[in-house]
Image (tube, helix red, strand yellow):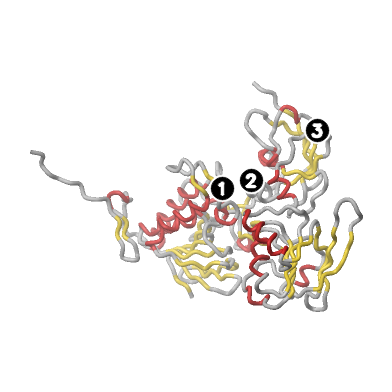
Amino acid sequence: MIKTDILIIGAGPTGLFAVFEAGLLKLKCHLIDALPQPGGQCSEIYPKKPIYDIPGFPEILAGDLTNNLMEQCKQFEPGFTLGERADTIEKQEDGSFIVTTNKGTKHQAPVVAIAGGLGSFEPRKPLIDNIAYFEDKGVEYFIKDPEIYRNKRVVISGGGDSALDWSIFLSNVASEVTLIHRRNEFRGALDSVEKVQELKNQGKIKLITPAEVINVVGHHKVEAVVVSQSDKIHIDKEFEIDCDHFIPLFGLSPKLGPIANWGLEIEKNAIVVNNALDYQTNIPGIFAIGDVNTYPGKLKLILCGFHEATLMCQAAYQIINPGKRYVLKYTTVSGVDGFDGTRKEAPKQVVKSID
Amino acid sequence: MTQDITIKIIDRKGNAHKVLAPTDMAMNLMEVVRSYELAPEGTIGVCGGMAMCASCQCYVMSDTLLPEMQPDEEAMLSEAFYVKDNSRLGCQIHITPELDGLEVELAPES
């Protein structure tokens, strides 16, 4: 059981900043995120894109914003459960909550802050009728352990960075790698595209374009995929490729997911909170901050998430330390005392006479 | 003041809506759909309009002359589902006076 003061669901910019604000109030945080890395959309969807409305940053890349937030909160030693989705929540007699992930990891905290953005990122599954039957029987939408592909025949479909990068990586692991994409053009980092070209020329990757996997074949496990290839001039030809694994990599799309069943009031795919007070939900002790919440006048902006995280932490302090006195302090005045023993503070002013 | 234009949008349930769209607010078609709440929040414009998610895919039903597809829109559509010959990404279609009378149908959610 992982125990903490504030359990934050979602490690995007809002969740990460909440760690900092909580730390100033001596509250410890643990974050759960379905993605394997922190940053949420900023690192998953658009790490290389600039953002222009972060106060104090005329321009910052989304990936750099994530790195900065990680640096800003690191002295408060947040814990992370990454690559797992928060599935269930149970209220305990003492008022605390136990949140369990899809992998069974349990977390307990008196306050839960949902900073889930648009939801947890789920793989976009190709429209193949029988694909669900083969999930975990040779069809995988994520590559968790590349070793399971050693000396196996693998078919990857997709045209983005992950399809290219995994084709390159697995060409040294699998006995056979076939990359299938609907077009001849790939969109990815230039060096990845060039590397695939090189591996194709060496015969280490088989490339089939423009083509699409339209069916999966096998008894209780993947044995082959059916591919439809078309060159827009001749009629489509269909053929089978024998393989042990089929890995469709068509990106991720966010879904509110199991949180929708936690008994929270939901409106417009977002969690209703009490505007202007502390962003608490209809369940006391559970807060929703950032893009995942809604209230009259809501704006889905990172800067609004920062504000909401800050107010939420004040309310969490009251829940965790009932009746304990506190006044807001400026970091410039009080400095920042990390849980790791570090201290940041403004340099003392020099008091010296001038002759 | 610039004139609003009229656009016909068929939502994912098959209902048709005639809406007015401003041409002077640098809006795109995805944003027009959101401003009239013709698709639930969170199911359209997920990436915010960067041609990176295809949640605003629509089928162009009129013969309105549209701006040419840029490489990133073309690449995204090549990875999207339910794509047809008349598919476009709403976020890449900027609302200009020339689009008056445009008719589109929203592609299914995926």
Q: Position of residue A211 (x, y in %)?
A: 81, 59
Front in this rendered view, residue B15 or A137 = A137
Q: Is residue A62 left or right of residue A219?
A: left
Q: Residue A345, how many percent across, how many down?
A: 28, 54
Quadrant (top left/top right/bottom left/bottom right) for the N terminus of chain B: top right
Residues packed near mark 2 inside 10 Å, few (<14), some (14 to 19) or many (20 plus): some
Q: Residue at x 35, y 65 (%)?
A: A339
Question: Which mark is drawn over residue B64?
Answer: 3
For badge 3, the amino acid type reads Thr
Q: Are marks 2 and 1 in contact (CB under 8 Å)?
A: yes
Q: Residue at x 76, y 54 (%)?
A: A184
Taking the spot 45% from the left edge, 63% from the top edge, the residue there is A6
Residue A49 image label: 1
Residue A146 or residue A168, whichever sits in front: A168
Q: Secondary structure at mark 3?
A: loop
Q: Amino acid at mark 1?
A: Lys
Do badges 1 and 3 share one subunit? no
| Residue A332 in the image, given as x and y percentages of width and height | 30, 49
Label 2 and label 1: CA atoms lie apart by 9 Å
Q: In the structure shown, which secondary structural element does the residue marked by tag 1 occupy?
A: loop
Residue type at mark 2 is Met
What is the secondary structure assignment of the residue under circle 2? loop
Instruction: Please identify the quarter of the rendering in which residue A125 is found.
Output: bottom right
Q: What percent of the width, then of the height, locates residue A45?
A: 60, 53
Q: Is residue A348 above or below residue A80?
A: above
Q: Quadrant of the C terminus of chain B?
A: bottom right
Q: How many marks?
A: 3
Q: How far apart, in angstroms, are the residues tagged by discs 2 and 3? A: 23 Å
Q: Residues within 10 Å of mark 1 (few under 14, many from 20)?
A: some
Which residue is the site of mark 2?
Answer: B50
